[in-house]
Image (tube, rainbow, N blue to C red):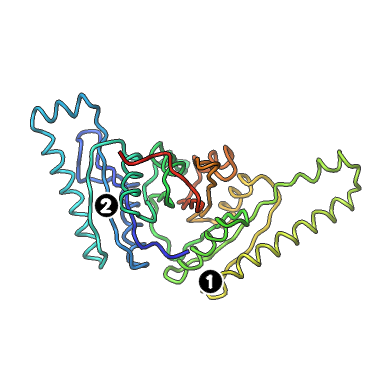
Amino acid sequence: MPAFRDILVGVDLSSADRLAGAELTPPVRAAVERGIELAREMGARLTFFASLDLSAHTLEFLERSGATGTVREQAEKALAALVGKAEREGVEASSEFVFGRSWVEIIRQVLREGHDVVIVGTRELGAAGRILLGSTGMKLVRKCPCPVWIARPDPTPDEWNVLVATDLGDIGRRAVELVVQYSHSVDMKVHVLHAIEQEFDRWTQMTGLSDAEIAQLRRAKREEIERELHDQLGQTDYRTVPSGVLMHVEEGLAESVIREAIARFDIDLLVMGTVGRRGLPGLFVGNTAERLLADVPCSVLVLKPRDFSSPITLE
């Protein structure tokens, strides 16, 4: 999987007291900073994209009053300042502003221009320090055809702790490959995790196997998964990761296993995949993963399968 070469950062310019302001919220600033850092590290192009969602009545009123041009000018001025910031840091950057629902217009921009990752911010959930993807972030995760990075508004760590949750399929392999490649540009410690969701205890009730036989089955299954995980890592140059790659195979529901690993290893970025069912978007373990993504306490990068088809089309 090639490194990201064309990055889109979604910028929310709306605020409580103005339609399009230059003052960015912490989540949006986090997305901007992450986009600039990623573009600089990977030698990528960067586009700052903003969309203002106004009702047809409001937009008509603004057009009649001549205020539409003012709103656009304010938005484009704010975006131009971000372009200047990126260029001062050696990043090739541009900007785009449209009227419409943010998540829909972001996807249409991806379809038009072929961006290979979208970065957006999160929303904070108070003193608990957890995050909420929000409607825009969740809809992008479900429906955007390219990877989506949900950036948490935290300072950039000196060394990233990155967790790759792999299902051992193609998308898991690509997630591992991308993170290994990214580790050559950024100091990071990489954890690769697979959850064994097979319920051995239920087998006991159904088959009458002894505890010893169940333990043997568990060991055999773990050894099989570990071999597959080694094979997946072996398709990358993971041995060149400066801080190394740690492999974890755990029993339990993926949601619980991932949450526990995030807490145990103080994870800064979770990398995971979705699957497309018959061309429609769906999370890789259905509603379980969706609940996980709703309030996971770190940044998240979600990859899409090769055959993923977005339900959004260009008009």
The kind of secondary structure element at disc 2 is: strand
- According to the picture, the residue beneath numbered tag 2 turns out to be 48
Q: Residue at x 49, y 66 (%)?
A: 188
Q: Which image quadrant: the C terminus? A: top left
Pinpoint residue 119: horizontal percent, then vertical percent: 37, 51
Q: Which mark is residue 57?
A: none
The kind of secondary structure element at disc 1 is: loop
Question: What is the three-letter code of the residue carrying label 1?
Answer: Ser
From what the image shows, is residue 239 above or below residue 263? below
Question: What is the three-letter code of the residue carrying label 2?
Answer: Phe
Residue nearer the viewer, 254 or 227: 227
Pinpoint residue 175: horizontal percent, then vertical percent: 52, 59
- According to the picture, the residue beneath numbered tag 1 turns out to be 243
Residue neighbourhood size for the residue with mark 2, other residues' Cα within 10 Å, grouped as few (<14), some (14–19), many (≥20): many
Residue nearer the viewer, 105 or 13: 105
Pinpoint residue 267: horizontal percent, then vertical percent: 52, 56
Q: Residue at x 38, y 50 (%)?
A: 153
